Amino acid sequence: MFEGFTLERREIDGVAVNFRMGGEGPPVLMLHGYPQTHAMWHKIAPMMAEHYTLVMPDLRGYGDSGKPPTDADHAPYSKRAMAGDLAGLMADLGFDKYAVIGHDRGGRVAHRLTADYQDRVVKLTVLDIAPTEHMYRMTDMEFATGYYHWFFLIQPADVPERMIGADPEFYMKKKMGQWKGKDALFADEALAEYVRCFSMPETIHASCEDYRASVGVDLDHDRADMAAGRKLTCPVMALWGAKGLVGRKFDVLAAWRERAEDVSGEAIDCGHFLAEELPDDTFARVRAFLGDGPW
């Protein structure tokens, strides 16, 4: 995977950020979701790299990036803290303006990054999510059943950590299998990387902290933006899987229009993992949205 890309590691404000980088053109930051790593981009990255300089990190707490100690408010795993790592990384690489693509948890980090650094993010693409606050506010039994992990992972430490830790590979494969839209979805090399990283006890704990932050400090940040009438000003494209739960349960474009001024997007014929299920279709829509730059 990732032939022609470099694998690098930098310290950003005391937190190690592991990332792949390659390609040529305007910079694009690509953020993975739960319970994956930057390896999720392996099918789409070669196509993207023909047009853009790609930066694909492991989020704080995931993959081979740092997993700092938490606190009672789970603030070290807030989307604001995670976004700060990435804003610092892009600045360290010399990029003052860039587009951002985020899938799943990476989309939530991308949302916060765009909100907090509106002068830097020129375009935002989110894959198979609606805004966090909206999804919690609109939760019903069907959503809570399908996305049970949202409510399991927020339980006090170390209840979910010990239960997942008893067989992390089984849990991860079962959870991801419930979201995918077709068989033989994950490349063996990518799946092995997901298993390797998610089997680390510190990753299991950090990922739980990510979700715990989402029902506390992250909602505080989101509600403060909403109360102040702050919206994303850059163009936003939302793509989601037509066979997934997000599109069935939420009016995705309407939800994003609550939080952003310029929103477009559509469903594509797959499940949750757009970039791995339909990489060509996903790339075509992203390419049309991003254009050629410069930015």
Image (cartoon, helix red, strand yellow):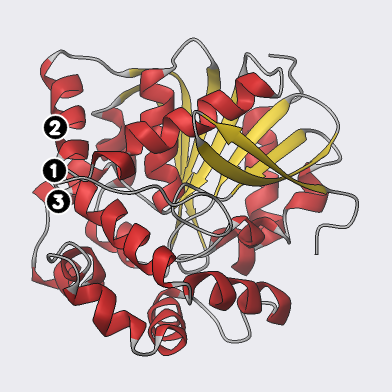
Label placed on residue 136: 3
Q: Earlier in the sequence, mark 3 or mark 1?
A: 3
Could you tell me residue 15's position as x and y percent? 50, 39
Q: Are marks 3 and 1 in contact (CB under 8 Å)?
A: no
Q: Quadrant of residue 242?
A: bottom left
Query: Residue 140, relative to residue 260: is it above or below?
Result: below
161 lies left or right of 294: left
46 lies left or right of 98: right
Q: Are marks 3 and 2 in contact (CB under 8 Å)?
A: no
Circle 1: element type: loop
Q: Which residue is mark 1?
A: 216
Q: Which residue is mark 2?
A: 220
Mark 1 belongs to which amino acid?
A: Gly
Q: Quadrant of the C terminus?
A: top right
Mark 2 belongs to which amino acid?
A: Asp
Q: Quadrant of the N terminus?
A: bottom right
Label placed on residue 110: none
Q: Are marks 2 and 1 in contact (CB under 8 Å)?
A: yes
Q: Quadrant of residue 117?
A: top left
Inter-mark Cα distance, 3 to 1: 12 Å
Question: Which residue is at the far top?
Answer: 119
